[in-house]
């Protein structure tokens, strides 16, 4: 047995604090003293494949320098050894076992032994099958891996009758089936239509007309094309396939290779065959040697599975278990006995075109590991464009909130321009992930029924693949069902109600819009600390107003205050006297307003006439620039407000670009919801880049979940659990009401002084998922669902 590796770990501050209660400190590196109590044991399959050395390295990086003992053991491809490793860790007292099984079924016995000893079992990368003794599964989206590989081959294929050679992983690894299933999803239609002809598997040929295969059927094919995850097996199999076929079966060939190690072996075999004029070969893992092969043109692509993410998820799961909590869950995987909770991570397709950006510029590996990085792609042929991607944008282009619809639309279009780098097709459509994008804009007039019928028409008649918008929260809530029923992504912005990612959540609903909690959390903190603890609220009587009222109550109480009067008035209200009177009679020092559109003018007029602005501190959202002067009277100067976006606030490159380009295009500065439209476009484009342009709902979900990106407000993060988009928020002071202060004919709207800008992850917006989805909240703060 190889000497176990014991290393000293220090995790990020947070983790060390949590673990410190559970694990004893180890002095310095090297061996843990005999009998030392370990909290977490890690068992990996083999040191003979660079993939698993990557994981070991990334675990060490994450766990760091000073602090805690974690032991990593390798099973060297032997299930008996694996079981011994697990037993050794149990004896040492581990509380959590992170294990990547050598053989999915055989590992059940080891998992059961751990379970019997009270140890939580986290299945790592590969699922342990046929037992209930698995508590959690950290994984990548393995079907997406196979799909990315096959899609690559499909994208490179022109003509018909192209020779296709199939290879697979080890049949003892559940992942091998998932990878193959994903690949079959994309390849089978192209085999059926004659683009590809399978050359090396009679079993696959026999099943080539079936769009979906059973596990047994896949087992038959894999039995014929397995590499057993072994380079030598892969090389020998490729060579014997090449011997068995004739020159007519070669020429330009397409090869599905399951991972990097086997891809290099197979590529070497095909490269050495004089009848092979060109080969396209897939891989996965972004092993250093394969990245070099890609740079050198010897391997076509790899699928980057960012091991840092997997390691972080595994550590987060271990910490959750150590704390007696449940790790975050977004999916389940059936292991033959139970549905194992899991949170799969997205993968990225990498070839010469993006290898530098995805591998080196992203910080995954340093440039010094490779040669020839700078020269690649010089004579790359221009990729043929993919199909036009239609996006349905539902806004409010008429009526009370028409300005918001316009901001949303302009921002979205500029976001597409920004992400495309200005690249368009011959019809001027921006190109994202190699697909020209056409945006079809519809006006729902703020009417939820209309929003639904427009969305259905967009999907059914126009063939849109993604939905964005709307302005009205009521419409947004109505659209969640359309997204679910059509399995199509709805990217909500600017509608702010938290219900879309709360009570009405489904996995197809995402947002870049802030929630009403972002609004109330930031302002509540400021007012409680600076004015007083008691609040009254006047809100518009709809989903937006009520959501905001509930959020205000939560936020005020979080900072030690209380909501003493919660008052709602209809959207059409023209005389606010009774509502304002009620607020004034409540004795609160603070009055918070949730309104939208031009009704603000009447409301503020009432507040001014009744002397409320002198008696109470009125806090509200500082809204759009265009109606600002008309809405906010002189009396409001010096007041404090929260703000979602004002172009003068953020200091970052994306905002600079937005301001400059908006000004050039429209001779105006961007406004309140322009940033949101742009953020929606950036998030969708980033996800499309990750999926290789595949906009299918189920493919986009893992690419959007956990997405962190830079947008006009700074850093945004889409929480994987509930799809809330964490983002910076502003507290501003109103210092001027003249739009064109310098009188040059262009309104600068320099109304504000910045008081405070929160970090994207600072406010702790609660997770409000309900019913079956409530469990997804994991470790996020929650509130009792109203
Ligand atoms: C992993 C791959 C790896 C393969 C061979 C699979 O289960 O997901 O990343 O290349 O095993 O070790």
Image: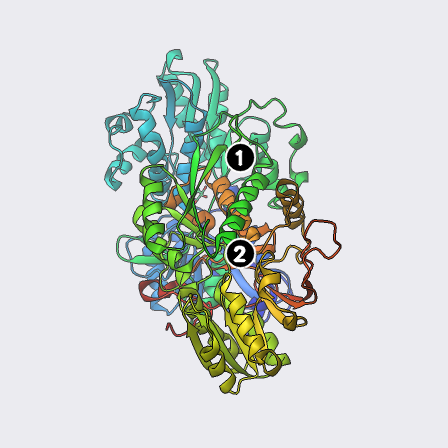
Residue 43 percent coordinates (x, y): 46, 55
Label 2 lies in ligand 1 vicinity (Cβ under 8 Å): no
* Residue appearing at x 60%, y 67% in the figure: 632
* Residue appearing at x 30%, y 53% in the figure: 335
Q: Give 662 or 41, whichever is nearer the viewer.
A: 662
Report helix, strand or loop for mark 1.
loop
Of the two numbered discs 2 and 1 on the same chain, state the one appearing first in sequence.
1
Q: Which quadrant of the render holds ligand 1?
A: top left
Report helix, strand or loop for mark 2.
strand
* Count of numbered badges drawn on the protein: 2
Q: Nearer the viewer, mark 2 or mark 1?
A: 1
Residue hosting label 2: 717
Displayed quadrant of residue 640: bottom right
Using residue 629 as the reference point, say whether residue 198 is left or right of it.
left
* Residue appearing at x 45%, y 25% in the figure: 156
Q: Residues within 10 Å of mark 1 (few under 14, many from 20)?
A: many
Residue 563 percent coordinates (x, y): 48, 81
Residue 363 percent coordinates (x, y): 62, 46
Using residue 190 as the reference point, say whether residue 760 is left or right of it.
right
Residue hosting label 1: 430
Using residue 124 as the reference point, say whether residue 757 is left or right of it.
right
Displayed quadrant of residue 549: bottom left
Image position of 25 with respect to 308: above or below: below
Per the model, the C-alpha gap separating discs 2 and 1 is 25 Å
* Residue appearing at x 54%, y 26% in the figure: 298
Residue 27 percent coordinates (x, y): 64, 69
Asked if residue 229 shows in the view, the reply is no
């Amino acid at each position: 047995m190889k000497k176990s590796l014991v290393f000293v770990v220090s995790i990020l501050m947070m983790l060390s604090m949590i673990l410190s209660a559970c694990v004893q400190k180890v002095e310095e590196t090297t061996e843990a003293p005999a009998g030392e109590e370990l909290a977490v044991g890690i068992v990996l399959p083999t040191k003979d494949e660079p993939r698993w050395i990557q994981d070991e390295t990334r675990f060490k990086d994450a766990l760091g320098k000073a602090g805690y003992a974690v032991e990593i053991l390798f099973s060297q491809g032997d299930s008996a050894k694996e079981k011994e490793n697990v037993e050794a860790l149990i004896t040492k007292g581990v509380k959590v076992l992170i294990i990547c099984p050598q053989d999915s079924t055989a590992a059940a016995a080891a998992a059961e032994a751990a379970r019997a000893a009270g140890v939580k079992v986290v299945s790592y990368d590969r699922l342990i099958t046929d037992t209930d003794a698995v508590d959690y599964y950290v994984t990548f989206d393995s079907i997406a891996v196979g799909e990315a590989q096959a899609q690559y081959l499909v994208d490179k294929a022109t003509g018909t009758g192209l020779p296709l050679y199939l290879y697979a992983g080890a049949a003892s690894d559940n992942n091998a089936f998932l990878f193959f299933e994903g690949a079959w999803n994309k390849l089978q239609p192209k085999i059926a239509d004659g683009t590809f002809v399978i050359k090396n598997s009679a079993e696959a040929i026999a099943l080539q007309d079936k769009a979906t295969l059973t596990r047994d059927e896949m087992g038959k094919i894999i039995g014929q094309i397995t590499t057993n995850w072994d380079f030598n097996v892969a090389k020998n199999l490729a060579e014997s396939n090449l011997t068995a076929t004739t020159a007519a079966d070669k020429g330009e060939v397409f090869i599905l290779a399951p991972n990097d190690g086997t891809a290099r072996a197979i590529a070497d075999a095909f490269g050495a065959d004089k009848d092979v004029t060109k080969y396209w070969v897939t891989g996965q893992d972004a092993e250093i040697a394969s990245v070099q092969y890609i740079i050198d043109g010897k391997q076509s692509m790899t699928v980057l599975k960012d091991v840092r993410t997997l390691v972080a998820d595994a550590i987060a799961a271990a910490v959750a278990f150590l704390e007696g909590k449940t790790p975050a869950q977004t999916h389940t995987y059936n292991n033959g006995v139970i549905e194992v909770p899991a949170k799969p991570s997205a993968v990225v397709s990498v070839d010469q075109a993006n290898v530098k950006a995805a591998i080196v510029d992203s910080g995954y590996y340093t440039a010094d590991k490779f040669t020839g990085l700078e020269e690649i792609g010089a004579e790359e042929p221009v990729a043929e464009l993919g199909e036009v991607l239609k996006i349905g944008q539902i806004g409010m282009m008429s009526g009370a909130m028409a300005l918001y619809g316009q901001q949303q639309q302009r921002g979205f279009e500029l976001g597409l321009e920004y992400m495309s780098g200005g690249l368009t097709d011959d019809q001027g459509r921006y190109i994202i992930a190699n697909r020209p994008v056409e945006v079809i804009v519809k006006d729902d007039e703020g009417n939820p029924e209309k929003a639904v019928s427009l969305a259905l028409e967009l999907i059914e008649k126009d063939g849109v693949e993604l939905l964005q918008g709307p302005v009205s929260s009521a419409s947004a809530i109505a659209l969640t069902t359309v997204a679910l029923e059509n399995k199509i992504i709805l990217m909500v912005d600017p509608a702010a109600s938290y219900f879309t990612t709360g009570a009405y959540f489904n996995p197809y609903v995402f947002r870049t819009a802030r929630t009403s909690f972002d609004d109330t959390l930031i302002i509540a903190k400021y007012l409680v600390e600076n004015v007083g603890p008691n609040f009254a609220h006047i809100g518009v009587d709809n989903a937006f107003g009520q959501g905001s009222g509930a959020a205000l109550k939560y936020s005020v109480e979080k900072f030690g205050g209380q909501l003493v009067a919660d008052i709602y008035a209809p959207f059409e209200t023209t005389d606010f006297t009774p509502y304002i009177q009620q607020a004034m009679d409540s004795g609160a020092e603070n009055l918070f307003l949730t309104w939208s559109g031009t009704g603000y003018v009447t409301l503020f007029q009432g507040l001014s006439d009744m002397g409320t602005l002198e008696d109470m501190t009125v806090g509200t959202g500082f809204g759009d620039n265009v109606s600002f002067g008309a809405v906010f009277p002189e009396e409001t100067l010096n007041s404090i407000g929260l703000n979602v976006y004002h172009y003068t606030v953020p200091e970052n490159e994306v905002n600079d670009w937005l301001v400059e380009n908006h000004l050039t295009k429209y001779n105006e500065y961007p406004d309140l919801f322009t940033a949101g439209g742009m953020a929606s476009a950036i998030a969708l484009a980033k996800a499309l880049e990750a999926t290789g342009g595949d906009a299918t709902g189920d493919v986009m979900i893992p690419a959007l979940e956990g997405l962190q990106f830079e947008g006009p407000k700074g850093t945004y993060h889409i929480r994987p659990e509930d799809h809330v988009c964490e983002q910076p928020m502003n507290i501003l002071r109103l210092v001027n009401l003249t739009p064109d202060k310098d009188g040059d004919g262009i309104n600068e709207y320099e109304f504000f002084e910045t008081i405070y800008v929160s970090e994207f992850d600072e406010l702790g917006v609660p997770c409000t998922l309900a019913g079956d989805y409530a469990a997804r909240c994991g470790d996020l703060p929650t509130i009792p669902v109203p």
